[in-house]
Image (tube, grey):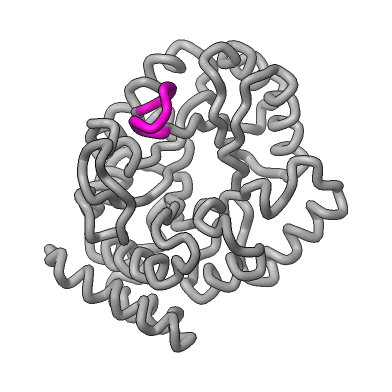
Amino acid sequence: MTISRRSFIKTGAAGALMLTAGGLDAAASACISPKKKAAKTEDKFHLGAAGYTFVKFDLDTALKTLQRADVHYLCIKDFHLPLNATDDQIAAFHAKCASYGVTGYGVGPIYMETEAEADRAFAYARRVGVKVLVGVPSYEILPYVDKKLEEYPEIKYAIHLHGPDINIFQTASVIWDKVKDLNPRLGMCLDVGHDLRGGADPVEDLKKYHTRVFDMHFKDESEASKAGWCVEIGRGKIDFPALVRMMRKVGYSGVCSLEYEKDMDDPFMGIAESFGYLKAVIANS
């Protein structure tokens, strides 16, 4: 079935308006036809949210937003669960997430430039009990990260790409070239927005590098260049229906986490519109 971009926008916008009235769960349900509900259960991937989306809000606000959006996965940032959290704090964090129907599936991004910082990040991921560590290592520390994976066989390390804004790991191809001969659990978090701004095609990059894609950050961009800025998903330059089809084609089985970086003081309308659009795309692509 082919659905126009305008139809997706209308669906997402309707979800955004219903969020303000406390009815996003109904909007999400309206995005998925009965015929498509059964097909959705066959997908190996899940929608989630990157913790940075809620950098200016407490954990309860983040979890309530995800609950109302009927989204059940969160990549944990350290402002919601500190790197030095005690076991009791970690247990309380997971219990609170569960009370909202949310699972913390990964941690990061965590920046690391020294061996001590890498040690702390890996130990944190294990204590939190997640299988995905999203990291931003320096090029110099990468061999040490590769070695650390031998000590942590349960963890996949996903290097977060940042497009043209920093001088390392700008695109998926850069990460691939750095990790292709290293531990197979050393891969990438494919941030599709930053990949696009770095001059790449995220759909083609997923196709080429999917064996090393362990996490994905979803955002849309106004332009396919460094000048681009974050917009509501469906309003920008990324072909999300094609991306979803490629995820199915390559059998991507991780989480696709919305990382919404617009209107950070009041992002909720944009979050609702973006999730509404993505749910419609997944249901109809």
Classify residue 170 by image quadrant: top left
Q: Residue at x 26, y 62 (%)?
A: 281
> Which SS does the magenta portion mostly show?
loop
Q: How many marks?
A: 0
Looking at the figure, which quarter contains the N terminus?
bottom left
Question: Height in image: 186 above or below 141?
Answer: below
Residue 94 at x, y = what percent? Answer: 73, 58
Residue 119 at x, y = what percent? Answer: 73, 24
Q: Residue at x 33, y 42 (%)?
A: 192
Looking at the figure, which quarter contains the C terminus?
bottom left
Q: Residue at x 66, y 26 (%)?
A: 153
Residue 77 at x, y = what percent? Answer: 62, 48
Classify residue 261 by image quadrant: bottom left
Question: Height in image: 154 above or below 7?
Answer: above
Question: Height in image: 47 above or below 197?
Answer: below
**Is 223 contained in the magenta span?**
no
Q: Which residues are magenta?
A: 162-170
Residue 237 at x, y = what percent? Answer: 20, 49
Q: Note whether residue 231 is visible.
A: yes
Q: Note whether residue 239 is visible.
A: no
Q: Residue at x 53, y 51 (%)?
A: 52
Left or right of 107, for residue 52: left
Question: Height in image: 139 above or below 4?
Answer: above
Q: Nearer the viewer, residue 283 or 144?
A: 144
Q: Nearer the viewer, residue 102 or 200?
A: 200
